[in-house]
């Protein structure tokens, strides 16, 4: 994957062109970076054109200036698409990446070929109680990180992944997350319940793992009730980061979804 750092944005992105017609965009979870999709990159590199980003404050997107905010992520992603002459893209987001994927789709629906969100929730219809519970858990995790990033990463890997291999891979990325970048996560609530979901012009897939948080399972069920036409997938033997826990099953599921979606449907 070739890294690219735009002059007018803090976001580093990674690109692999295979001369295929369709583009895939991967958006990673909090506290890690684009490398959480390395198994997907290897599997799809000759089947699709691939685009991945490091979210602001993560990985190689840590050189920021005053005023930069995670709320600008949809605009920065759209600027990347324009710079690379990408008209439409299949978007897959995990956890925080699922939130940002939806935020982008809210702003730029015509640029979306399909949307797949795992370990996330419907940001346009997020229950107030669930929102408060989620915020409380995030604050507790951040307190751990303020004492020790190593302590935080050890606790976080067990929450974020289910299999030992995935936990170790998550930890190796999480340990590199800078404490100062927590400030970029503080304004995420600004993306919640800001848009009303209309008729989607693209197919939607949602899901999580059987060993994800109970709250996440409930969020997927609630989202499915709200949008019954979407495809809901619960991955067996997987936790929060399903693409890392069960990569082969995840890859097959995504490939079938993208084929059924097509580039312009």
Image (tube, rainbow, N blue to C red):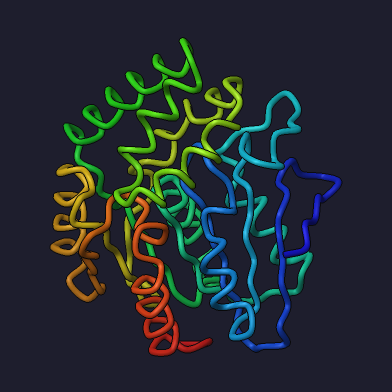
Residue drawn at 35 percent across, 48 percent down: 164
- Given residues 223 and 28, the one toward you in this image is 28
- Give the x, y percent position of residue 8: 82, 45
In front of the other: 218 or 110: 218
- Quick check: 85 left or right of 30? right
Give coordinates of residue 240: x percent, y percent. 31, 49
Relative height, residue 56 to residue 121 (above, below): above
The residue lying furthest to the top in this view is 147
Please report the residue visible at 50 percent of the width from the left and 21 percent of the height from the top.
Answer: 149
Residue 96: give x, y in percent of width and height: 44, 45
Q: Residue pushed farthest front?
A: 164
In percent of width and height, residue 245 lies at 35, 58
Q: Residue at x 42, y 54 (%)?
A: 94
Quadrant, the C terminus: bottom left
Q: How many marks?
A: 0
Placement of 177 over or under 216, stated as above or below: above
Q: Is 165 placed above or below 174 here?
A: below
**Pick the front one: 218 or 58:** 58
Q: Quadrant of the N terminus?
A: bottom right
Picture layout, residue 162 above or below residue 179: below
**180 left or right, relative to 196:** right
Q: What's the residue at 52%, 24% (across, down)?
A: 182
Whether residue 143 appears in this view of the structure is: yes
Work out whether residue 120 can be spotted: no
Q: Is 184 displayed left or right of 231 in the figure?
A: right
């Amino acid at each position: 994957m070739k890294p690219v750092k735009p002059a007018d944005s803090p976001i580093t992105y990674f690109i692999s062109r295979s001369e295929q017609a369709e583009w895939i965009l991967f958006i990673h979870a909090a506290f890690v970076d684009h490398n959480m999709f390395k198994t997907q990159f290897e599997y799809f590199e000759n089947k699709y054109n691939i685009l991945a980003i490091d979210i602001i404050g993560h990985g190689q997107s840590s050189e920021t200036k005053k005023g930069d905010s995670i709320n600008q992520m949809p605009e920065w992603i759209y600027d990347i698409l324009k710079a690379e002459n990408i008209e439409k893209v299949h978007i897959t987001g995990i956890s925080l990446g699922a939130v940002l994927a939806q935020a982008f789709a809210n702003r730029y629906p015509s640029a979306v070929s399909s949307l797949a969100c795992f370990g996330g929730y419907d940001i346009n219809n997020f229950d107030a109680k669930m929102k408060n519970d989620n915020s409380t858990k995030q604050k507790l995790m951040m307190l751990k990180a303020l004492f020790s990033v190593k302590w935080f990463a050890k606790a976080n890997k067990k929450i974020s992944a289910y299999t030992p291999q995935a936990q170790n891979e998550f930890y190796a990325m999480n340990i590199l997350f800078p404490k100062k970048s927590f400030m970029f996560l503080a304004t995420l609530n600004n993306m919640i319940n800001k848009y009303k979901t209309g008729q989607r012009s693209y197919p939607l897939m949602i899901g999580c793992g059987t060993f994800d948080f109970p709250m996440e399972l409930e969020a997927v069920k609630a989202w499915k009730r709200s949008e019954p036409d979407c495809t809901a997938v619960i991955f067996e033997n997987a936790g929060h980061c399903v693409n890392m826990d069960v990569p082969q099953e995840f890859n097959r599921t995504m490939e079938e979804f993208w084929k059924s979606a097509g580039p312009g449907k």
